Image (cartoon, helix red, strand yellow):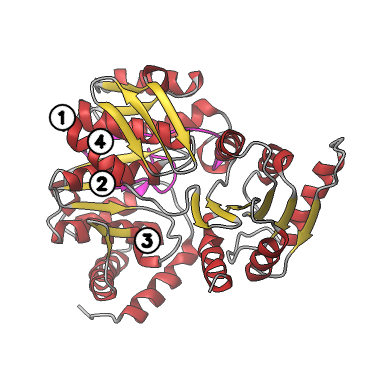
C-alpha cells in the first residue's frame, strides 16, 4: 500500500468528489467488505433528521464523555475545519491520521475497481475513513450522522446499531428524498433496524405517523421526546433550562429555542436506551458546545451566526429572534445555496430585518449575492412597512461584515445565517475587525 501525504490524500478526495452523490448501499457494502467490515465491531448511535443532527450529537457526546466513555463523532458538512468531520473525544482527526486512513481506503477502492466495480463516492470514502478511525481508536460509542436521508445513505450499512435517533424532519433535499413530508420521513426512518430502539422528537403528524409505522413493522421500541412533557421552561440568549420528568432540571448554554427540543431528545435517548443517571445527563448537557448554531461571536453590536438553511430552520430561527430580541434592530448577512428554497427562507426572516447584506458563499452551488438581493427586494416590495429595509449585495463576506458592524449601533443585532459553508469566513472577518 502506498502511503499518501496529507496533501496527496486531500487531492485524491478532491478528484473523486466529482462523482457527486449516489444513493444506495451496494458500493459502501463492497468497500467495507474490502476493509473487513470493521463497522460491525462498533457500538453506534445512528442519527438522522433534517435539522438538529449536529446539536443532538453534541449533547450525546458531552454526556457520554461525562460518563467516562471514549466517544467518536462523524458529522457533515465541515464548517470551520475540514478535519472536524471526524472527532474522538472532541478532538479532530490529525492530518497524519487522515492521510494514513485515506491511503488505506484508497487501496480498498483500487481493489474494487480492478474487480470491475465502480469507484466509491467521496461520502462513501469519508464514511469508510470514519469507521476505520473509530475502530482503531477503540471508541466505546460512535455517534454517526447520516449525510442525507437515511435508508439509502452510506452510513446505513449498519446492521445492529445501539439505537436510532431521529431529529426534526422537514422539507429539504426533495430532489432525492421525496416531495412530501411523509416521503422524506420514510427515507429518514430507513435507519430504524429490527428490534433496535428508536428515539424521536415529537414530529409533525405526517412524519410521526410514518416513524411509528416503521417502528412497529421492525418491532423496534419507540421512545418519543415531547416538549409538552416539560415544565418551567426558561430561555435567554445565554441558554435555556427546563424541568424534565424523571431527570430533573436540565440546563444548556447552547442558545436558540430549538435547543430545547434537541437537548430533550438527547436526554430521552440517554435515559431510556443507555440508562445513564440523571446526574450525568444533566452535567453533560450543561457542558455541550456546538459552533455555528445561534452562536454569539461578538458583542457591541451583538453578532450571531446560525446555519439556518431551510424553511423549518428559518421558522425556528425567527421564533428565537422574536423571543429574545423583540423591538431590537436587526441587520442580516445572508448567503445561500441555489438549490435551497431561499425564497421561503427570506419570506420567513425578512419581517424582522432593518438592513440586509447578501453574499456569495464559496461553494459551487452558491446563489450569487446579486440574485439573492434581487429576490429580497421583490419580497420586501410587497410589504406595507413605514420604513424601507435597505438591501445591498456585497462583493465579499469581509465587506458585508465590516459594513454591518459599522452601520449597526451598540444595542443592535447582526445575524449571519444561511449556508453553513460561509460561516467560517464570517467568524474570521469578525475576528479581524475586532482586533
Magenta segment range? 144-173
Tag 4's secondary structure? Answer: helix
Q: Which mark is residue 275?
A: 1
Would residue 165 be visible to someone looking at this image?
no
**Which one is closest to the eye, mark 1 or mark 3?**
1
Q: Position of residue 49 (x, y in %)?
A: 42, 37
Q: Nearer the viewer, residue 76 or 380?
A: 380
Compared to residue 67, the image places residue 72 above or below, namely below
In x, y percent, where is residue 293? 47, 48
From the image, give the main secondary structure of the stretch colored magenta.
loop
The CA span between labels 4 and 3 is: 47 Å
Secondary element type, mark 3: loop
Q: Nearer the viewer, mark 4 or mark 3?
A: 4
Which residue matches tag 2?
A: 62
The tag earlier along the polypeptide, 1 or 3, is 3
Q: Nearer the viewer, mark 2 or mark 4?
A: 4
Task: Mark 2 vs mark 1: give the one in front.
Answer: 2
> CA separation, marks 1 and 3?
43 Å
Amino acid at each position: 500500500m502506498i502511503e499518501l501525504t496529507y496533501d496527496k490524500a486531500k487531492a485524491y478526495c478532491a478528484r473523486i468528489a466529482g462523482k457527486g452523490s449516489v444513493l444506495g448501499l451496494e458500493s459502501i457494502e463492497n468497500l467495507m467488505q474490502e476493509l473487513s467490515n470493521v463497522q460491525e465491531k462498533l457500538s453506534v448511535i445512528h442519527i438522522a433528521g433534517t435539522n438538529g443532527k449536529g446539536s443532538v450529537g453534541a449533547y450525546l457526546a458531552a454526556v457520554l464523555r461525562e460518563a467516562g466513555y471514549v466517544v467518536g463523532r462523524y458529522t457533515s458538512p465541515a464548517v470551520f475545519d475540514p478535519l472536524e468531520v471526524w472527532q474522538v473525544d472532541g478532538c479532530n482527526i490529525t492530518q497524519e491520521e487522515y492521510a494514513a486512513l485515506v491511503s488505506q481506503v484508497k487501496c480498498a477502492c483500487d481493489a474494487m475497481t480492478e474487480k470491475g466495480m465502480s469507484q466509491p463516492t467521496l461520502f462513501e470514502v469519508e464514511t469508510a475513513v470514519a469507521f476505520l478511525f473509530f475502530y482503531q481508536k477503540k471508541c466505546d460509542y460512535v455517534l454517526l450522522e447520516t449525510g442525507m436521508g437515511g435508508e439509502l445513505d452510506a452510513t446505513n450499512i449498519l446492521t445492529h446499531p445501539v439505537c436510532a435517533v431521529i431529529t426534526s424532519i422537514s422539507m429539504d433535499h426533495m430532489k432525492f428524498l421525496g416531495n412530501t413530508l411523509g416521503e422524506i420521513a420514510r427515507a429518514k426512518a430507513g435507519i430504524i433496524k429490527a428490534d433496535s430502539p428508536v428515539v424521536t422528537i415529537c414530529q409533525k403528524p405526517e412524519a410521526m405517523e410514518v416513524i411509528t409505522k416503521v417502528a412497529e413493522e421492525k418491532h423496534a421500541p419507540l421512545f418519543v421526546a415531547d416538549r409538552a412533557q416539560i415544565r418551567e421552561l426558561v430561555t435567554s440568549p445565554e441558554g435555556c433550562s427546563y424541568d424534565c420528568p424523571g431527570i430533573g432540571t436540565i440546563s444548556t448554554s447552547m442558545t436558540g429555542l430549538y435547543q430545547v427540543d434537541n437537548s430533550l431528545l438527547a436526554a430521552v435517548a440517554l435515559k431510556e436506551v443507555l440508562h445513564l443517571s440523571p446526574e450525568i445527563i444533566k452535567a453533560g448537557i450543561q457542558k455541550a458546545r456546538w459552533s455555528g448554531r445561534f452562536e454569539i461571536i461578538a458583542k457591541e453590536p451583538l453578532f450571531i451566526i446560525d446555519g439556518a438553511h431551510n424553511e423549518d430552520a428559518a421558522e425556528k430561527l425567527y421564533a428565537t429572534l422574536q423571543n429574545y430580541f423583540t423591538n431590537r434592530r436587526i441587520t442580516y448577512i445572508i448567503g445561500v445555496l441555489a438549490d435551497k428554497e431561499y425564497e421561503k427562507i427570506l419570506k420567513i426572516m425578512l419581517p424582522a430585518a432593518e438592513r440586509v447584506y447578501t453574499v456569495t458563499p464559496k461553494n459551487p452551488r452558491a446563489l450569487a449575492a446579486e440574485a439573492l438581493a434581487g429576490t429580497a427586494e421583490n419580497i420586501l416590495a410587497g410589504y406595507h412597512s413605514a420604513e424601507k429595509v435597505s438591501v445591498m449585495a456585497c462583493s465579499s463576506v469581509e465587506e458585508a461584515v465590516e459594513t454591518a458592524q459599522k452601520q449597526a449601533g451598540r444595542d443592535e443585532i447582526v445575524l449571519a445565517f444561511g449556508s453553513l459553508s460561509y460561516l467560517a469566513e464570517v467568524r474570521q472577518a469578525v475576528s479581524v475587525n475586532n482586533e
